[in-house]
Image (tube, rainbow, N blue to C red):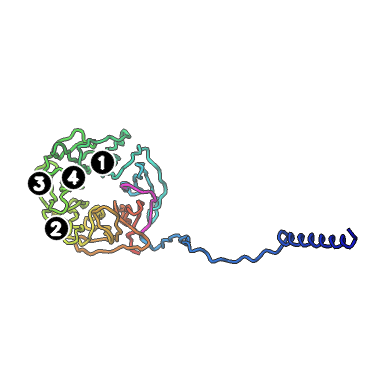
Amino acid sequence: MNKKAIAILGAIFILIVGTLGFLIYSKYGKKTPAPITQNPPEETAQVVVPEPVVIPETSKFSKLIEDQVVSPALFFNGKGLAYFDLQGRLYQVKFEDGSVKPVIAEKKALDVEPRANISKVLWPKKGDHFIAEFNGGGQKSLSFYDSDNVKYVDLPPQISAIDWFPGGDSVLFIWTENNKSTLAIGNPDTTNWKKVSDLWELDDQISVSPDGKNILFYETSATGTTNSINLVTPDAKVWKSLVKEGYNYGVLWSPDSQKFLFGKQDKNTRKYQLWYYDFSTGEVKSLGLFTTPEKAVWGKDSQTVYAAVPVTGSAGESGLTIDEFYKLNTSTLEKESFADSNFTLDGRNLFLSNAEDILFFKNAQDGGLYTLNLIKK
């Protein structure tokens, strides 16, 4: 091959190598990145973190205890309270001395055997014993807690209703067996009992007056028909039918034992209205509030009533309600409303401080214990 041909082939080879080198560098060599194009965001739900709810200091309502409480009750000296949680643990809460509204100074669990499914506690007026109601799988059972021996004593299943006498050392109960009911008085564990009388119905509820001199009873299953609220004395010498018309639900004695509240089902709305009975005058009247005795409490004067009245939902029925709170004079029917848009409240287990400047209640909406400041600012 002549020199000219070799030179041409060499030039072609160099050109090919150069071209390949340029292509490789263009593909893999260092280069400036292309600008990033901002694509529009996908249409997804935007997560918004809510601002914490700040309750103004001017609010009359406040939350005192976060636990889901069962049957809270004030100490006898008014300086604290006791309650159960849903696991059946008993707590004692003490308040700070000298505070205008309740401030927790100490909270401790007491050495009481925890029992699940606790739904209600009957506290006596005096003493450290109590009767607990349990509801597991739809079955109700009762137990007496003997604080002297620090143990529960299960009550016989034949006990269908029970209430304390004011001394705290005896109870009134109904024994139901073989389609027969008997009213009896006995020790808190129902031993050493004595018969008061036979009863006509198998489903009566009972309530002992604060002075222990009278007993109210009424049938509970005659929903929508007529059931009477009746009175009997502990010696069974006096029997009276007090409220004879309509369907009646629940009773709540006044502190002086001379009056009681009861719920009566309204014929038109089918909701319960709060009614009033006065022994001294025989007066029976509606208080104009659509609620039940279980959502009310008497003042010490046996004239003032505080009540949680549903705005949404109905008292006496299953399910939650949204309530507005009222103070009512049972003589004049003059009432005062307490409302606060910062809270959703379903008032249960109402009780007052000893000075009657604070209303305590369980809020069934979240199970916590709340307070209402009753002092006018």
Identity, as a three-letter code, of the amino acid under mark 2: Val
Question: Around disc 1, counting alpha carbons within 10 Å, would you say few (fewer than 14), some (14 to 19), or many (20 or more)?
Answer: few
Quarter of the image where the N terminus is located: bottom right
Label 2 secondary element: strand
Q: Hey, which residue is sitting farthest right in the picture?
A: 3
Return the disc, 1 or 3, that comes first in the chain's sequence.
1
Q: Quadrant of the C terminus?
A: bottom left
For disc 2, the marked residue is 284
Mark 1 — residue? 139
Amino acid marked by disc 3 = Trp
Q: Are marks 1 and 4 in contact (CB under 8 Å)?
A: no
Task: State the SS at label 1.
Answer: strand
Instruction: Give residue 146's position: percent from left, percent from top.
Output: 29, 36
Find residue 141 and report its horizontal and vertical position in percent: 26, 39
Q: CA distance from mark 2 to mark 3?
A: 18 Å
Instruction: Give the image quarter of residue 322.
Output: bottom left
Q: Pointer 3: what residue?
A: 239
Left or right: residue 39 compared with residue 377:
right
Question: Eyeballing the image, is 206 above or below 193?
Answer: below
| Separation (CA) of disc 1 from disc 2 | 36 Å
Query: Which segment is the magenta one?
Result: 61-71
Inspect the image, locate mark 1, and give the three-letter code of the amino acid beneath it.
Answer: Gln
Q: Earlier in the sequence, mark 4 or mark 2?
A: 4
Does dot 3 land on a helix, a strand or a loop?
A: strand
| 1 or 2: tag closer to the N-terminus | 1
Three-letter amino acid code at disc 4? Gly
Query: Of circles 4 and 2, which is in front?
Result: 2
* Label located before the other in sequence (1 or 4): 1
Few, some or many C-alpha atoms within 10 Å of disc 2 (few <14, some 14-19, many ≥20)?
A: some
The residue to which callout 4 is attached is: 212
